[in-house]
Image (spheres, coloured by chain):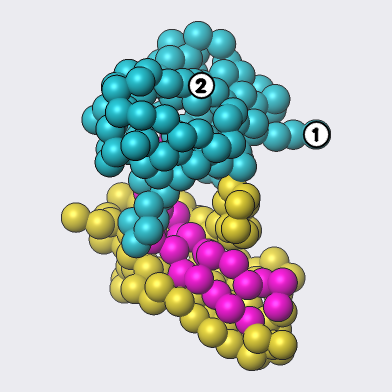
Chain colours: A cyan, B yellow
Amino acid sequence: EAQVTQNPRYLITVTGKKLTVTCSQNMNHEYMSWYRQDPGLGLRQIYYSMNVEVTDKGDVPEGYKVSRKEKRNFPLILESPSPNQTSLYFCASSGWGTDTQYFGPGTRLTVL
Amino acid sequence: DQQVKQNSPSLSVQEGRISILNCDYTNSMFDYFLWYKKYPAEGPTFLISISSIKDKNEDGRFTVFLNKSAKHLSLHIVPSQPGDSAVYFCAASGNTNAGKSTFGDGTTLTVKP
């Protein structure tokens, strides 16, 4: 089954404790993105990647890092999380030449 | 500056009637537009799209209309069903660059039985 998986689905942590949210897709897609969803602000892109070792900032990259060492994986790293990063995070992927994105189920992060 | 706007946070319609969700954009470089549907506790799923070379695209009960001169698109659902109750996001991209989509804030549609 074609899918995008994210782990963990729920995470409660404390300020400053480094964390990683994993994302994996099994569709051999070139493009992958991370979004955060906040009430009244819709989906805002954090980072995106056009292929292995090629990443670029989205609209709200501050406080986040990403890496794309393998085509299927695109982890989101919060080196020193802060309460304003409490949000619902989505990973998405899409294939070359198409704009249709496939989203993961979301990770709800709470930073205390 | 928000480049894609959905000015109605919520919409409520009766089952069987038409639902019309609206979206406005400001960036004239956008040439591809998509609608996604999102249920609670799930990720958004693709619903329907339209290229800027068209003004209408239809898929079953769902039709998207694009008015380039007004920088406006709308999603029509006819007839609306209770299972259509969800959050609908409008998204836009340019040059088929799938890595860089801009989303609106979303409109919550409630279809009452």
Dots 1 and 2: beta carbons under 8 Å?
no
Residue at 52% x, 64% y is: B88
SS assignment at label 1: loop
- Amino acid type at mark 1: Glu
Q: Which mark is residue A74?
A: 2
Q: Which residues are magenta?
A: B82-111
First in sequence: mark 1 vs mark 2: 1
Q: Which mark is residue A44?
A: none
Q: Quadrant of the N terminus of chain B?
A: bottom left
The correct choice, above or below, for A26 with respect to B56 in the image is: above
Residue B99: x and y in percent read: 44, 34
Q: Nearer the viewer, residue A8 or B103?
A: A8
Q: Which residue is mark 1?
A: A1
Q: Nearer the viewer, residue A57 or A51?
A: A57
- In space, the residues marked 1 and 2 are separated at their CA atoms by 19 Å
Q: Is residue B55 left or right of residue B83?
A: left
